[in-house]
Image (cartoon, coloured by chain):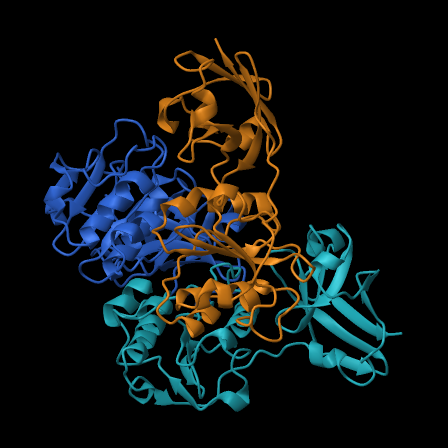
Chain colours: A cyan, B blue, C orange
């Protein structure tokens, strides 16, 4: 992909975001893109490829917002980084004239997404690279439920530190029922205190905190929460205001 | 290596191809380079280091083709990316005046290959960086055998998705005995259908396909063929036209 | 971090050193930085983040030497790459005006270290980015002991090849008691010969050598010394001159 990009747009700055998304894990890729994309400068072109449906009829998309361009498969991978309200244009680039021919049935990263992104990088108008199409498919994340002073959520992902990342957001904890109260987190039969930072827990003890992506996570200082609690994606988590 | 390159050629664009080659696995490195090199623009300098023989008498090579330069150890690592017919010049750079001194006995990537490549990047003529030498050592890949309507090949590598990459090429399957016929793939006691893409198989079911490097591979949708079939490098594979 | 850097210093060249430091392993990070930093050109800004104490009162530092700038947490991570005698200035950038606001309690890489480093890259004087502060915390590495013709040291790290990296330096072996003598290495109940390079040992046999960072290491040709000897960080090692 990098070779193809540099062949088309020799001046492009290429930055690797991550190569640690587990195979076929579209949700993990979507979360990684959501966490990183807002911190890149305006004009950035984000190319994301976690693409188990490559070679089938899933669309290949170029999506623009007011400040950035996103290129990737239509499987939800782009959907967390690009909220519906932020989309200014959705183009199907499956048959883009920018694509390499023949297009491999197994590696559209190289043959479709990289050349389309590189054309944008060298100044080609997106409208010339695809055709207008319906909105992208969106990942249906599990919802956070609230009942009185209790929130119920789910572990979405485990990061490389073994931290359990949940779908409960800082904003959920800022709601009137929870603000300025002591919070107790229940996960996997444990009651876990909520703290400010990784280092403020005791070594080996599970601690909850709101992470740099504004999501509630459970961590173990100097250890792996996933291993210590034996939990992973899908595990339920509850927050109670006391 | 990157620090050394930027010290010599501050304007060089450095692109990481992969850091996932298993330790000492020259064949895996050679396959990765073969898969990527053709997609880089003319003038690219490819530096490859998988070098278990570092510090012994194996040569350090700079090889040119009409469009690119390759720098690395003489252990076959460059040999799949650079067919014999494409070589325009083979130089031994073991004692290149570009090398860092003293040369470490364990890291020629830093002390020989990186500085030699950086000198090429800043415009030094290859002939000034080494002495003409005999052709590079080539990897002897297992051969594909054909008997009537049956091809027999071998698994060469397992990629990070657990796909089993074989030595059977698209061109082998295009031979008269196989073209426009139904093909059946036998591997590890399984009979595997051949399909167009990963997504066209059923989840959990092994599927054969011709990958983006034009090699026959066996994959499992949403899973690992290596794990599910319990196979790896060296496993035999057969293709039969029915 | 890369997005933040490019937003502040669009012309910065960003080079990844490694993403393979084990979680929370400050010593492994410090060794990686020590091994690489001297090979980068003058003017390089090194940003290092292995930061289990993020969000606590540990300082965030910008340290200058005559040729380079180092930015990272005050937990010893920078201390092997920057000997005390090389420091020309130590600044606390915890409350730098360059930091992103609000500063996350869990990711100062993004909110403090990256923006501070990027400001240096675009030409802002370090003195405007922090306040003078006391010297950095330094890692207390185990010491090499010498008694007559015997040195005793310790395994500091295991690299991705399974090599056991010790704290015994080339200079220790160059002392009068050891120079020009046969050396025998004892580790984990084995007596290991010292050789010039990985390739000069026999396959499967443990071999000691002085590596490209001038440290004594124990390797197994075509294998992993850590696995074969069942040893890791903290294992004792002895060198005897015979």
* Vertical order, C229 against C50 (above or below): above
Is residue B27 shown left or right of residue C24?
Answer: left
Q: Nearer the viewer, residue A65 or B135?
A: A65
- In which quadrant of the rendered view does residue C201 lie? top left
Q: Farthest residue toward the top?
A: C242
Q: Nearer the viewer, residue C145 or B94?
A: C145
* Vertical order, C44 against A12 (above or below): above
Q: Nearer the viewer, residue B154 or A12?
A: A12
* Vertical order, A201 against B72 (above or below): below
- In which quadrant of the rendered view does residue C43 lie? bottom left
Q: Nearer the viewer, residue A209 or A8?
A: A209
Is residue B204 shown left or right of residue C44?
Answer: right
Q: Residue at x 44, y 15 (%)?
A: C176
Whole-percent x and y of residue C57?
Answer: 69, 59
Whole-percent x and y of residue B136?
Answer: 19, 37
Is residue C100 shown left or right of residue B191?
Answer: right
Whole-percent x and y of residue B64?
Answer: 15, 48
Q: Residue at x 76, y 50 (%)?
A: A204
Q: Farthest residue toward the right?
A: A242
Residue B145 in sight here: no
């Amino acid at each position: 992909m990098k070779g193809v990009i540099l062949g088309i747009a020799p001046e492009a700055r290429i930055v690797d975001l991550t190569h640690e998304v587990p195979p076929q894990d579209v949700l993990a890729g979507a979360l990684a893109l959501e966490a990183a994309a807002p911190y890149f400068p305006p004009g950035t072109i984000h190319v994301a490829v976690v693409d188990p449906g490559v070679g089938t009829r899933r669309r290949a998309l170029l999506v623009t917002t007011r400040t950035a361009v996103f290129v990737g498969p239509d499987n939800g991978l782009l959907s967390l980084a690009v909220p519906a309200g932020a989309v200014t244009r959705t183009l199907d680039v499956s048959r883009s004239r920018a694509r390499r021919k023949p297009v491999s049935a197994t590696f559209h990263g190289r043959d479709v997404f990289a050349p389309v992104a590189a054309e944008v990088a060298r100044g080609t108008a997106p409208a010339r690279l695809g055709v207008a199409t319906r909105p992208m498919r969106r990942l249906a994340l599990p919802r956070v439920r609230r009942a009185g002073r209790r929130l119920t959520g789910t572990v979405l992902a485990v990061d490389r530190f073994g931290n359990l990342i949940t779908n409960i957001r800082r904003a959920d904890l800022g709601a009137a029922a929870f603000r300025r109260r002591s919070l107790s987190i229940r996960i996997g039969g444990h009651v876990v205190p909520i703290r400010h930072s990784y280092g403020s827990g005791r070594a080996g003890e599970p601690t909850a905190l709101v992470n740099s992506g504004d999501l509630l996570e459970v961590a173990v200082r100097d250890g792996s929460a996933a291993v210590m609690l034996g939990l992973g994606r899908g595990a339920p988590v509850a927050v109670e205001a006391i």
